Amino acid sequence: MTWRCAWLAIEMEVFQVFIAKREDGRFVRRGWFRCTATMLFKKYYSSMDTHLFVFSAG
């Protein structure tokens, strides 16, 4: 089975911002990922229902 990213634009931007924060020595908590990803979902996919965007437990 191959894993495929459903929201590539969001994942790439979250990762870039995460790396920048860590390089600055800042802490990044799980809640930051949820808030940032949700905000970016609304930015990139504003015409879609936000219930389509869910998080996994891992």
Image (cartoon, rainbow, N blue to C red):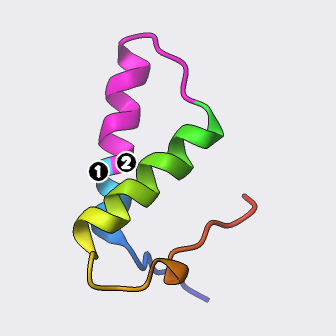
User: Residue 49: x percent and y percent?
Assistant: 43, 85
Q: Nearer the viewer, residue 5 or 34?
A: 34
What crowding class fits label 2: few (fewer than 14 Cα within 10 Å), some (14-19), or many (20 or more)? some
Q: Is residue 9 above or below residue 5?
A: above
How many numbered tags mark residues here? 2
Tell me if I can see residue 3 in this picture.
no
Res 17 quadrant in image: top left
Q: Which residues are the magenta region?
A: 14-28
Q: Which mark is residue 5?
A: none
Judged from this view, the residue extending furthest toward the right is: 57
List the residue tagged with mark 2: 14
Q: Which residue is mark 1?
A: 13
Q: Amino acid at mark 1?
A: Glu
Name the chief secondary structure element in magenta: helix
Query: Looking at the figure, which quarter contains the C terminus?
Result: bottom right
Q: Quadrant of residue 54?
A: bottom right
